[in-house]
Image: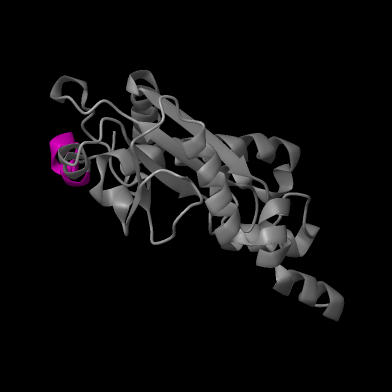
């Protein structure tokens, strides 16, 4: 468990209730995981949860505030109760080709468009818009403020952590299962020792190329 009292779901429904009051029936939340790491995919999730009191899930919050076992527990409940959810990823090659922001937008668009039923509105964490025909509302720090976005953040984080654990089995020398591709000292030390592998983001690791070319790696 997380060691703290679960966040009451009713405390995070301000934006959802606002959308319902404007006539929406299905409100989706969308968020990403993995914009910052040096390796691996960016992952986006979109989810429509029932908002009637009896179906609410207490404890949903910004995934970064939750311990891994609590995220796993909540992710299972979210998948079980969701009216619809989708999780998509864009790999490091796509990130290098179009940049991390555009890869995130593309990934989130795919997740939102995979939802069925189609939402009436999508709440998006952050300050960027995605190329969908649906009404959308951006909420900075939305994963901590919105029930639906918080749920999407948990789905994305749990999925990505599992992917990095799978990739760790292919590239065990880097420790991906521990740091999930983020630029920890252990990770950068491993890059200096072994060089870059197939799943490293070249646009995020330019200094390691420069170091290698200068003989400093």
Front residue of this view, candidates 87 and 131: 131
Image quadrant where one finds the N terminus:
top left
Q: Position of residue 195 (x, y in %)?
A: 79, 60
Looking at the image, which residue is at 39% across and 62% down? 127
Is residue 100 within the magenta segment? no
Residue 25, picture quadrant: top left
Looking at the image, which residue is at 55% across and 40% down? 110
Camera sees residue 217: no
Q: Position of residue 180 (x, y in %)?
A: 57, 47
Residue 189, picture quadrant: bottom right
Q: How is the image coloured?
A: one colour
Front residue of this view, candidates 163 and 67: 163
Using residue 204 as the reference point, say whether residue 57 is left or right of it.
left
- Residue lying farthest bottom? 214
Looking at the image, which residue is at 56% across and 37% down? 88
Q: Is residue 151 above or below residue 212?
A: above
Q: Position of residue 40 (x, y in %)?
A: 64, 48
Camera sees residue 187: yes
Give the magenta range. Answer: 5-15
Q: Is residue 78 above or below residue 98?
A: above
Q: Position of residue 31 (x, y in %)?
A: 42, 46
Is residue 14 within the magenta segment? yes
Image quadrant where one finds the C terminus:
bottom right
Using residue 164 as the reference point, say whether residue 209 is left or right of it.
right
Count of marks, rendered view: 0
Front residue of this view, candidates 193 and 163: 163
Looking at the image, which residue is at 48% across and 52% down? 130
């Amino acid at each position: 468990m997380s060691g703290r009292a679960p966040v009451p779901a009713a405390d995070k429904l301000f934006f959802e209730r606002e959308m319902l009051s404007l006539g929406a029936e299905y409100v989706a939340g969308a968020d990403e995981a993995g914009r910052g790491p040096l390796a691996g995919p960016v992952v986006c999730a979109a989810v429509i949860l029932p908002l009637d009191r009896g179906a609410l899930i207490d404890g949903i919050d910004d995934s970064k505030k939750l311990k891994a076992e609590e995220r796993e527990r909540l992710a299972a409940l979210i998948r079980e109760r969701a009216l619809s959810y989708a999780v998509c990823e864009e790999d490091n090659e796509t990130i290098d080709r179009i940049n991390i922001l555009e890869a995130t937008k593309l990934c989130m668009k795919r997740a939102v468009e995979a939802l069925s039923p189609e939402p009436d509105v999508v709440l998006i964490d952050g300050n960027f818009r995605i190329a969908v025909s649906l009404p959308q509302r951006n909420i900075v720090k939305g994963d901590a403020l919105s029930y639906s976005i918080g749920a999407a953040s948990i789905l994305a984080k749990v999925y990505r952590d599992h992917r990095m654990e799978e990739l760790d089995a292919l590239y065990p020398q880097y420790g991906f299962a521990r740091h999930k591709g983020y630029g920890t000292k252990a990770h950068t030390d491993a890059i200096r020792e072994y060089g870059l592998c197939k799943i490293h983001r070249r646009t995020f690791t330019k200094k390691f190329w420069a170091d290698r070319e200068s003989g400093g790696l």
